[in-house]
Amino acid sequence: MYRTCFFIMIYFPIIHAFTCGQSSIKPNDLSSTKIINGTEARPHSWPWIVSLQHPLLGHFCGGSVIDANYVISAAHCFFNIFFYDSIVFIGNHYLTDRVEYRTISAVIIHPFYTLVDGSPDDIVLLKLNQSIDIKSYPPICLPTNDSAILELPGQRLTIAGWGLTNESESSNVLLQTTLSIFDSSIPECHPFMNDTNKQLCVGVIGGGTGSCSVSITKAK
Ligand SMILES: *[C@@H]1O[C@H](CO)[C@@H](O)[C@H](O)[C@H]1NC(C)=O
Ligand SMILES: *[C@@H]1O[C@H](CO)[C@@H](O)[C@H](O)[C@H]1NC(C)=O
Ligand SMILES: *[C@@H]1O[C@H](CO)[C@@H](O)[C@H](O)[C@H]1NC(C)=O
Ligand SMILES: *[C@@H]1O[C@H](CO)[C@@H](O)[C@H](O)[C@H]1NC(C)=O
Ligand SMILES: *[C@@H]1O[C@H](CO)[C@@H](O)[C@H](O)[C@H]1NC(C)=O
């Protein structure tokens, strides 16, 4: 079935003032038809993806580096959690990797976010206690006003993360999978769509893939 994951990061191959969305390690085939359950990502091919981990709860959400000092994630990840103890792990392939990590010095939740399933504005900025080297961890690209990504039913997107592989457990390796954007007016999308300017309906008709997205890339 669908999970309500509206934390959606978009890679758009356009010119930015700084390099974003460029990995020195090429990801595995994005046009893969294997869309159920996900497949292991090529290690470090999504360098902006971070794992947010709590000392007691372990991995609880993913995020993406947007510049040297900030990570973007989902607001719902920070509603019920004592975030001051959480650690941002950067450069992980396995959840248990300890490559580069930071604490969180500020949590900025979108002011319009409400803790209703499917709420739009489910977005949070996390300020890192110390900057990271964006040459090693290039940031994800953010959409611009004219990206028009929200109007592309039929487009395929690649998501990556350590999402739940079943009801209870996260994958220990970074997974990726390719999904389709649906026309948000179809009934399956309806329960979750409140603002088509802010939300995308993606998934697999009939369900199957339940990964909560931490990163979405336009599939070639
Ligand atoms: C996906 O995972 C489920 C549960 O582990 C399994 O039953 C199913 O066969 C998998 N589907 C594919 C296409 O691998
Ligand atoms: C930031 O947090 C990391 C991880 O706890 C720590 O190793 C580092 O010393 C901290 N940096 C600063 C400037 O406090
Ligand atoms: C959608 O918007 C309506 C009206 O603003 C609000 O009552 C409802 O809770 C919202 N639903 C979600 C899932 O955010
Ligand atoms: C993008 O659109 C918003 C809302 O219309 C506007 O406030 C903002 O200035 C625009 N940003 C750019 C860079 O054009
Ligand atoms: C859930 O997934 C984990 C990791 O993929 C696996 O080890 C575990 O056996 C699964 N549990 C169930 C109930 O399927």
Image (cartoon, grey):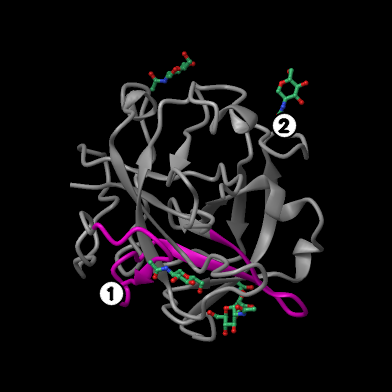
Q: Which residues are the magenta region? A: 33-62
Count of residue discs:
2
Image position of 32 with respect to 54: above or below = above
Residue that appears at 54% across and 31% down? 189
Q: Residues within 10 Å of mark 2 (few under 14, many from 20)?
A: few
Q: Amino acid at mark 2?
A: Pro
Q: Quadrant of ligand 1?
A: bottom left
- Residue 52 locus on image (x, y percent): 61, 67
Residue that appears at 48% across and 57% down? 208
Image position of 59 with respect to 181: above or below = below
Residue with the mark numbered 2: 111
Q: Residues within 10 Å of mark 1 (few under 14, many from 20)?
A: some
Q: Earlier in the sequence, mark 1 or mark 2?
A: 1
Per the image, label 1 sits on a secondary structure element best described as loop
Identify which residue, 3 or 64, lies in the foreground: 3
Q: In the picture provided, is 159 more to the left or to the right than 86?
A: left
Residue with the mark numbered 1: 42
